[in-house]
Image: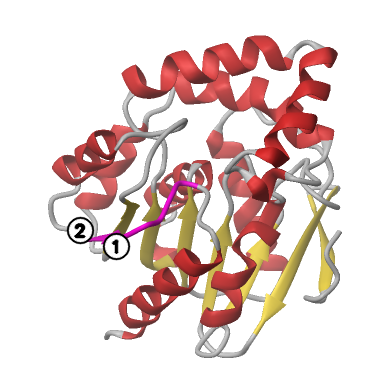
Amino acid sequence: MEREIPWSTVFVGGKKIALYQLGQGYPVILLHGLVAKGAWSLKHLAQKLSEHFWVIGIHLPGYEESEEYKFRNYHQLGKLIMGVTKKLGIQGSFHLFGHSTGGTIALVIASEFPERITKLSLFEPPFTKQNVRFFWRLSALFASFPGFIWFLRQILPRTGISDFKGGKSGSLLALTRIGKILTKSEFTENCRIITNSDIPVLLAFGNTHGLFLSLHSMKGITEIMPHSQQIEIQGAGHTLKRESQEILAEHLISFFSDP
């Protein structure tokens, strides 16, 4: 585990959840994606945001020191995150940012607890079933074989998905559960609920795509969230390298700071 940023744990529903906290001020919750070293994959974003806000990066279940949790749907994960905010003493509302599958969790939270979310920002949450279904089902199938788990751990650090290096086997095995959940996602329904609420939304995309998503699928989100703000970050890929995180941070600072 990386040690340059202090981290701690809280217990929610008997489960240990690891997190880090940086800065002071209005709270901002960061939710990371599936193929990542937990919340460490957003540490550069967190460090920049912490100059203006109280930033909480949460390691989702099965990542780093967060205990594995056999969740059945995103609703359960959303309730878990809300339990973490309660443990941290956040009684009022907060800003919420989600990257990739963390964005899907953020959508569920915002649609189920709109009174708690001041502003919502998403970076490339998985979208259309036709774009996501095959990849995740294939991943879920192979993730059930221990030999494939070993293969992924060997090869992924040598690809553009460098943030995956050091990931725990628990997060790899989560492919099976996440894959099943995504194919049954009510993503569009959640988007429409948020669109009908008063929550300001910032949708962020990179212009470099490959294994996971296409820019076309990202543009599709804007069709069901037409009142959202949208930004495209040049040179950014789905895994959000350091430079892209720092550029994104400037946009988020502006977005979160506006009245």
Q: Which mark is residue 89?
A: none
Q: Is residue 19 left or right of residue 48?
A: right
Q: Which secondary structure, mark 2?
A: loop
Q: Residue at x 71, y 17 (%)?
A: 143
Q: CA distance from mark 2 to mark 1?
A: 6 Å
Amino acid of disc 1: Leu
Residue occupied by mark 1: 202
Residue 9 visible in the picture: yes
Q: Nearer the viewer, residue 66 or 219?
A: 219
Along the line of sight, the residue nearer the viewer: 25 or 207 = 207
- Residue type, numbered disc 2: Ser
The question of residue 237 being in magenta is answered with yes
Drawn side of residue 156 relative to residue 147, left or right: left
Give the x, y percent position of residue 7.
Answer: 82, 70
The residue at which mark 2 appears reads as 228
Quadrant hosting residue 221: top left
Disc 2 crowd, CA 10 A, few/some/many (<14, 14-19, 20+): some
Total count of labels: 2
Tell me which segment is drawn in magenta: 230-238
The C terminus, quarter of image: bottom left
Which percent across, then down, holds residue 217?
A: 27, 34
Name the residue rendered at 23%, 63% in the picture: 198
Which class describes the residues within 10 Å of circle 1: few (<14), some (14-19), or many (20+)? many
- Relative to 217, is 142 on the left or the right? right
Q: Quadrant of residue 164?
A: top right
The residue that appears at 48% across and 44% down in the rendered structure is 100
The reply to whether callout 2 and callout 1 are in contact (CB within 8 Å) is yes
Q: Is residue 10 left or right of residue 197?
A: right
Q: Earlier in the sequence, mark 2 or mark 1?
A: 1
Say if 187 sits above or below 25 in the image.
above
Find residue 175 and report its horizontal and vertical position in percent: 65, 26
